[in-house]
Image (cartoon, rainbow, N blue to C red):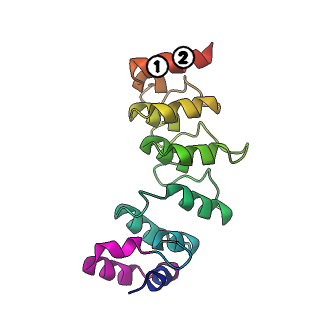
């Protein structure tokens, strides 16, 4: 099956068909159409959240998160939207250390809520510090993330930071 046919299935939201093709050949989810787009791009454009979730779980997002963000934003996606757990795109990018995605998101507009809190009160900076994503944490602080916001357990991002990162972050308070 060609990349174009697979991408058409994704755009149409054919979850069952794509899962069947995936069991036959796991590489099928990374096939590209003639424009270089993958099924995840087309599932995103088609608004098929369940299919996008499946594709992400299968690793389709690992090498092109910035393209996905660009597709979403160019189609009017709100970068401040939060999922059921209160996580935003910024939370996910910070926790996973997708620094190029972070740069794209923080450079978007003045309406991006850099200190948005999830269901547990964690900001993207909390998650970057907790996961040891030093570059992501520094980038967030450079774009206005606050160091002293407490989560529901009364921890600040600094409480999760390594000693070296903590010193670097505290320099921004001076």
| Residue 90 shows in the view | no
Look at the image and tell me in which quarter the N terminus lies: bottom left
Q: Residue furthest right?
A: 110
Q: Count the marks: how many?
A: 2
Q: Position of residue 157 (x, y in %)?
A: 48, 27
Give the structural element (helix, strand or loop) at label 1.
helix
Pointer 2 residue: 170
User: How far is mark 2 from mark 1, CA to CA?
Assistant: 6 Å
| Residue 22 shows in the view | yes
Q: Position of residue 100 (x, y in %)?
A: 55, 46
Magenta stretch prevailing secondary structure: helix
Q: Nearer the viewer, residue 60 or 33?
A: 33
- Compared to residue 31, the image places residue 158 above or below, namely above
Residue 166 image label: 1
Q: Magenta span covers which residues?
A: 10-31
Q: Residue furthest top?
A: 174
Residue 23 lies left or right of residue 48; in this view the side is left
Q: Nearer the viewer, residue 116 or 38?
A: 38
Q: Residue at x 40, y 62 (%)?
A: 56
- Compared to residue 94, the image places residue 66 above or below, namely below
Q: Position of residue 167 (x, y in %)?
A: 48, 15
- Few, some or many C-alpha atoms within 10 Å of disc 2 (few <14, some 14-19, many ≥20)? few
Q: Residue at x 37, y 84 (%)?
A: 17
Residue 24 lies left or right of residue 160; in this view the side is left
Give the structural element (helix, strand or loop) at label 2.
helix
Check if mark 2's residue and mark 1's residue have beta carbons within 8 Å.
yes
Q: Position of residue 89 (x, y in %)?
A: 54, 50
């Amino acid at each position: 099956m060609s990349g174009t046919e697979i991408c058409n299935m994704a755009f149409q939201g054919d979850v069952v068909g794509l899962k069947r093709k995936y069991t036959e050949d796991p590489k099928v989810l990374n096939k590209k159409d003639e424009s270089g787009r993958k099924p995840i791009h087309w599932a995103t454009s088609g608004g098929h959240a369940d299919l996008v979730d499946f594709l992400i779980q299968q690793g389709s997002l690992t090498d092109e998160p910035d393209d996905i963000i660009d597709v979403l934003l160019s189609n009017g996606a709100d970068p401040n939207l939060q999922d059921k757990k209160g996580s935003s795109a910024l939370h996910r990018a910070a926790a996973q250390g997708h620094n190029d995605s972070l740069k794209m998101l923080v450079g978007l507009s003045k309406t991006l809520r850099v200190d948005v809190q999830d269901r547990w009160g964690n900001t993207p900076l909390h998650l970057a510090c907790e996961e040891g994503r030093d570059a992501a944490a520094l980038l967030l602080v450079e774009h206005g993330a606050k160091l002293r916001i407490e989560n529901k357990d009364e921890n600040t991002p600094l409480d999760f930071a390594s000693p070296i990162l903590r010193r670097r972050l505290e320099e921004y308070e001076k």
